[in-house]
Image (cartoon, rainbow, N blue to C red):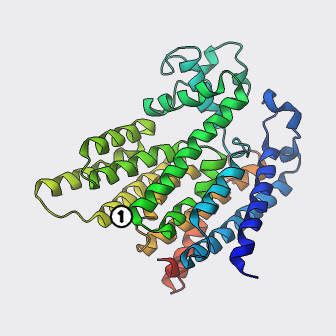
């Protein structure tokens, strides 16, 4: 029996198990889902840590096999992407991060209470039930106006119902995940290149499970460059501004835009392969700089989106693969210990960088893992 025939059903079952696993981390203060709270993740830390490690490893095995099958043409990328979205949409979004609660509550400040979220803190809304489970409620809006405006859509769709609003927020992120996958496909004309990004387990977990806004920011960054390459300057600049005013990280792409405009002014032909490569390097640089503050796993999306467009740059591709694996493993010390400090912090940093070192050593020894896909 062909592997391609078994792969999708096995993957669907795996995603269902991952979705069920995510609810082991249900917040006990989330009164809207109180009937589903078990406390299992806090009373069985060793077990859930091992299970998470196993799930991550299996996710990367699926990633490897899907890349092979998509390269052969045995499986269509859209089928895998749509299946992933359909199942993981129902996963618990605060399994690994509470950021989505912050998105929902900040939007509530702006669009329900009609207050300025850059002045009014969520914890000033005395008696609001969202404060029971929202982290960083003692801070004003942490993100730029582009994102605040976008979160008005889930707030409107939710109609005051928290659960509907929460999953509307996930739906917003899911839509931009699909748009990003399609845009990479349009730029590269290669389902394989799009799959390198779209099926990366880190991208899937941090986007379709945790619902981080980085996919929103990076979609508009990539759209900006694409529109400029199509000589749609106005749309390109507008998209660039939307991206920058999410969390300002894509300001690092300004040198690339300057490079493009200088070449245009001098009437030189623009090598867009190099433009995307330089974009990957610049976003990788700011990703590395985040280590001096705190390197969150979802930050890797910043450079992975460009790496998928230039996979022939093998060292960068393997580095992205190593970080993808290591950053997901970096959740395990907290799962095991329940704190972010001391030995947990040391273990976290080791887990982040060790896979990168291993992958690069294997490459230097002439054992590249992804050369067959490039």
Residue 168 image point, x, y percent: 63, 35
Q: Furthest residue to the bottom?
A: 366
**Residue underneath mark 1:** 277
Residue 366 position (above or below residue 339) = below
- The local crowd at label 1, few if under 14, some if 14 to 19, many if 20 or more residues have their Cα within 10 Å, is many
Image coordinates of residue 322 in percent, x first then y, are: 56, 67
Viewer-proximal residue among 105 and 328: 105
Q: Is residue 211 above or below residue 331?
A: above
Residue 135 in the image, given as x and y percentages of width and height: 66, 31
Tell whether 368 sits left or right of 19. left
For the point 52% across and 86% down, the residue is 365
- The residue located at (55%, 59%) in the rendering is 198
Q: Is residue 77 left or right of residue 163?
A: left
Instruction: Residue at 59% x, 77% y: name it.
Output: 68
Residue nearer the viewer, 28 or 179: 179
Q: Position of residue 347 (x, y in %)?
A: 67, 58
Q: Looking at the image, which is closer to me, 314 or 159?
A: 159
Q: How many marks?
A: 1
Q: Vertical placement of 349 versus 342: above or below?
A: below
* Point 61% across, 14% down: residue: 124
Left or right placement of residue 220 versus residue 368 in this view = left
Q: Quadrant of the N terminus?
A: bottom right
Location of residue 12 (image quadrant): bottom right
Badge 1 marks a residue whose secondary structure is helix
One can see residue 154 in this view: yes
Q: Is residue 326 visible?
A: no
């Amino acid at each position: 029996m062909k592997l391609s025939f078994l792969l999708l059903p096995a993957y669907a079952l795996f995603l269902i198990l991952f979705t069920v696993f995510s609810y082991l981390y249900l917040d006990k203060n989330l009164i809207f889902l109180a009937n589903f709270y078990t406390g299992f993740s806090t009373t069985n830390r060793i077990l859930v840590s091992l299970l998470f490690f196993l799930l991550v490893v299996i996710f990367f095995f699926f990633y490897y096999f899907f890349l092979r099958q998509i390269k052969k043409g045995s499986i269509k990328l859209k089928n895998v992407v749509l299946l992933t979205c359909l199942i993981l949409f129902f996963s618990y979004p605060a399994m690994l991060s509470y950021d989505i609660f912050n998105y929902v509550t900040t939007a509530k400040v702006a669009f329900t209470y009609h207050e300025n979220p850059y002045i009014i803190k969520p914890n000033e809304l005395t008696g609001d039930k969202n404060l029971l489970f929202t982290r960083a409620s003692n801070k004003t809006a942490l993100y730029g106006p582009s994102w605040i405006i976008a979160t008005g859509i889930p707030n409107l769709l939710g109609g005051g119902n928290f659960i509907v609003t929460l999953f509307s927020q996930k739906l917003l992120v899911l839509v931009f995940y699909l748009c990003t996958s399609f845009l990479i496909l349009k730029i590269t004309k290669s389902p394989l290149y799009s799959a390198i990004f779209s099926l990366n387990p880190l991208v899937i977990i941090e986007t379709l499970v945790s619902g981080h806004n980085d996919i929103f920011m990076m979609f508009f960054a990539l759209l900006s460059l694409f529109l400029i390459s199509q000589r749609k300057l106005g749309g390109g600049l507008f998209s660039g501004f939307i991206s920058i005013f999410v969390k300002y990280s894509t300001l690092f792409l300004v040198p690339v835009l300057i490079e493009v405009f200088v070449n245009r002014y001098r009437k030189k032909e623009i090598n867009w392969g190099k433009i995307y490569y330089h974009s990957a390097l610049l976003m990788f640089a700011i990703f590395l700089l985040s280590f001096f503050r705190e390197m969150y796993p979802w930050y890797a999306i910043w450079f992975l989106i460009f790496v998928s467009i230039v996979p022939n740059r093998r060292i960068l591709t393997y580095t992205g693969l190593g970080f993808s694996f290591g950053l997901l493993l970096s959740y395990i010390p907290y799962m095991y210990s329940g704190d972010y400090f001391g030995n947990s912090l040391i273990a976290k940093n080791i887990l982040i960088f060790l896979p990168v070192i291993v992958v690069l050593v294997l490459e230097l020894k002439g054992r590249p893992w992804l050369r067959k896909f490039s």
